[in-house]
Image (cartoon, rainbow, N blue to C red):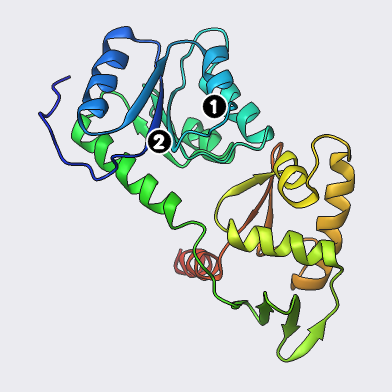
């Protein structure tokens, strides 16, 4: 694989983890991204990758090969998301089957690159995912609307077409967290850590009960949620209204 010389990639402070068991490819990628201003760490085994991903400070992005020894990339990603890690992840694989891509996305991958790939393409994808990640927690201001609901953060209030919806303090905190992490998979452990402020002292069933209660108050059909969706085996994802509308339009046109 030929590498471009010194492309300017605009991310001089980004920390990048490369989990790739091919030593030649891993070393080439490490050298390339270092030349372009990244702080890079390269590992070749799944267990080591998981250890790095779950160690603070978090990486800004992870390039994760599917075929890692000891623990494959899918399992590494699953355990990392379950541990509350929300660093963006690009999966690297020789498998180009649709089911493998779906599995990666279901586990919380942000993008998927199939080998062999051009390094310029990979670099562009890295920059795109980093840009999305940096804008994924935008300043929503004081008001955020979705569906018929309007959330006022400073007042801790939610209204549906002007009528107040009564949320508990914890339900509001959960909703606010989901909105500010919209589009990203949020694990139950992440909710424990960032909303409850603890680690492991509340069962995930308790979290599920609170989310179910919140759904009853904000979802048009709580048993078939539109906005606060379940990511099975991991946690939940708040889907923005534009994504819901776009998906509905695609289904109708099909």
Q: Residue at x 75, y 62 (%)?
A: 173
Residue 130, disc: none
User: Residue 240 appears in which quarter of the rendering?
Assistant: bottom right
**Residue placed farthest to the bottom in the image?**
162
Percent position of residue 67, x then y: 46, 15
**Residue placed farthest to the left in the image?**
5
Give neighbour class at mark 2: few <14, some 14-19, many 20+ (Cα, 10 Å). many
Percent position of residue 14, x then y: 36, 38
Query: Which residue occupies the foreground of this view, 248 or 113?
Result: 113
Give neighbour class at mark 1: few <14, some 14-19, many 20+ (Cα, 10 Å). many
Query: Which residue occupies the foreground of this view, 15 or 71?
Result: 15
User: Residue 123 appears in which quarter of the rendering?
Assistant: top left
Mark 2 near mark 1, Cβ–Cβ under 8 Å? no
Q: Residue at x 57, y 21 (%)?
A: 50
Percent position of residue 19, x then y: 43, 20
Of the image marks 2 and 1, the number of the one nearer the N terminus: 1
Q: Residue at x 53, y 33 (%)?
A: 57
41 displayed left or right of 108:
left
- Does residue 252 lie above or below 75 as drawn? below
Percent position of residue 35, x then y: 20, 27
Q: Judging from the image, what secondary structure is the residue with disc 1 in?
A: helix
Alpha carbon distance from label 2 to label 1: 18 Å
Q: Residue at x 14, y 37 (%)?
A: 7
104 displayed left or right of 238:
left
Q: Which residue is mark 2?
A: 112
| Mark toward the viewer: 2 or 1 | 1
- Does residue 88 lie above or below 154 as drawn? above
Q: Which residue is mark 1?
A: 53
69 displayed left or right of 204:
left
> What quarter of the picture does the N terminus occupy?
top left
- Does residue 100 lie above or below 187 as drawn? above
């Amino acid at each position: 694989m030929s590498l471009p010389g010194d492309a300017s990639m605009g991310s001089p402070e980004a920390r990048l983890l490369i989990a790739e068991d091919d030593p030649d490819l891993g070393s080439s990628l490490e050298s390339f991204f270092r030349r372009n201003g990244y702080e890079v760490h390269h590992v070749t085994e799944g267990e080591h990758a998981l250890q790095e991903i779950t160690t603070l400070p978090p990486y800004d992005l992870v390039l994760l090969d599917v075929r890692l020894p000891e623990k494959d990339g899918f399992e590494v990603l699953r355990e990392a998301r379950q541990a509350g890690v929300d660093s963006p992840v690009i999966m690297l694989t020789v498998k180009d089957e649709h089911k493998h891509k779906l599995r990666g996305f279901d586990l919380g991958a942000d993008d998927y690159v199939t080998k062999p790939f051009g390094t310029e393409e990979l670099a562009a994808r890295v920059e795109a995912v980093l840009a999305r990640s940096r804008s994924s927690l935008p300043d929503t201001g004081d008001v955020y609307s979705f569906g018929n609901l309007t959330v006022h953060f400073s007042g801790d209030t939610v209204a549906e077409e002007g009528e107040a919806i009564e949320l508990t303090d914890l339900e509001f905190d959960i909703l606010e967290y989901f909105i500010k992490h919209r589009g990203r998979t949020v694990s139950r452990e992440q909710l424990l850590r960032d909303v409850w402020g603890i680690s492991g002292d509340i069962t995930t069933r308790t979290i599920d009960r609170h989310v179910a209660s919140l759904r009853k108050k904000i979802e048009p059909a709580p048993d078939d949620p539109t906005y606060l969706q379940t990511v099975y085996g991991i946690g939940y994802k708040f889907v923005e209204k534009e994504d819901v509308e776009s998906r509905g339009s695609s289904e109708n046109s099909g």
